[in-house]
Amino acid sequence: MTETPTSMRAVVLDAPGPPEALQIRNVAVPVPKLGQVLIKVEAFGLNRSELHTRVGLAEGVVFPRVLGIEATGVVVDCPGGELERGTQVAAMMGGMGRTFDGGYAEYTCVPVAQTVPFTSDLDWVTLGAVPEMLQTSYGSLTVGLDAQPGQSILIRGGTSSVGMATAVLARRLGMTVFSTTRNSDRADVLREVGVQHPLVDDGDVAAQVRSLIPDGVDTALELVGTPTLPDTLRATRVHGVVCFTGMLSNQWTVRDFYPIEYLPRGVRLTAYGGDASDLPPTVLQEFLDDVSAGRARVPIHRTYRLDEITQAHADLEAGRATGKLVVLP
Ligand SMILES: NC(=O)c1ccc[n+]([C@@H]2O[C@H](COP(=O)([O-])OP(=O)(O)OC[C@H]3O[C@@H](n4cnc5c(N)ncnc54)[C@H](OP(=O)(O)O)[C@@H]3O)[C@@H](O)[C@H]2O)c1
């Protein structure tokens, strides 16, 4: 491995703004302290969370900031010796790209606890697409929903990258998958990731679900937010579980929440906000091995170079993607 340079290119945001507010600058390569690891970033996926930060919706962000809540690459320095130089790692969450500089760069320095090591011959585009998407999907299915083989699941916001990854995992678990898009010509995109019942979101998905399963689904993953949550709850059976994980609509609060009126009788509402610790290394490794063997697929929409970050964020904001947007720095 070559010497680590002292400066690097990074995407810096000085203050919230349009995609053009993302500036590529030369900055110093961070120097890791004990308990931290310096990673050469080979690829990073884009996330709605970074869109929230860019437009000023995220709390607790200190500017200027290198964005990016995830990155995938290779360890170049780990002073505490927890990870060997050359180890492939995924890094995510824990304040990355919000309270400390994140993955939109050639190098990123994060606490070791925010990393998950793996070994894979897959290309970096695929590896870069997986971590946050898999962690959110896996965490929602396990922590959020306690999903079980043979159960049914409704994924609201199904063409999102998290939605499609959840469909892949749910099918691997042996679940029956209902999944929504607002776009009728995207039904095939959902079928390709294993969805048995693609539904066009007309606002009354509960009626569509109950025409197929009269009692309602066992589990539901809400990714659109509070505008659709009451209907998602109505699509779910008594003692079924709805997990609130995403807010594609950018609306996530319920005003004047009166539980007896808001919640259908007997339907359980949970939520999920993830961390790297929710993605066991074995789960990441097995998923990557399954992708290598053709037993699972990673929904990727498009790849970009670092200097195309403005275009990438514009595409993210416009909702043009069906699958993960990945940048190769
Ligand atoms: N809780 C956590 O730990 C966690 C972690 C990561 C992500 N998330 C959340 O999970 C959600 C999905 O993230 P992602 O990165 O997978 O999204 P994404 O890939 O950018 O999803 C974009 C797609 O969402 C669909 N969508 C449905 N309703 C929408 C609406 N009202 N406004 C805009 N798009 C809508 C659109 O598809 P159609 O046009 O086909 O409907 C659009 O193509 C986000 O809300 C994100 O913040 C949560």
Image (cartoon, rainbow, N blue to C red):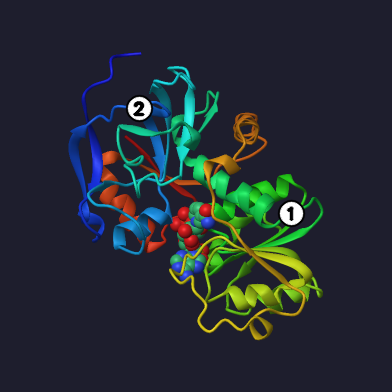
Left or right placement of residue 163 versus residue 81 in this view: right
Amino acid found under the numbered disc labelled 2: Lys
Left or right placement of residue 309 versus residue 262 in this view: left
Task: State the quadrant of the C terminus.
Answer: top left
Secondary-structure class at tag 2: loop
**In front of the other: 80 or 225:** 80
Where's residue 104, x and y in %? 32, 41
Residue shown at 50% from the left, 35% from the top: 113
Query: Crowding at label 1, few (<14), some or many (≥20) Cα neighbours within 10 Å?
Result: many
Where's residue 320, x and y in %? 41, 59
Left or right placement of residue 224 versus residue 31 in this view: right
Specify the farthest residue to the left: 26
- Are discs 2 and 1 less than 8 Å apart at CB? no
The residue labelled by disc 1 is 147
**In front of the other: 35 or 152:** 35
Secondary-structure class at tag 1: loop
Amino acid found under the numbered disc labelled 1: Ala
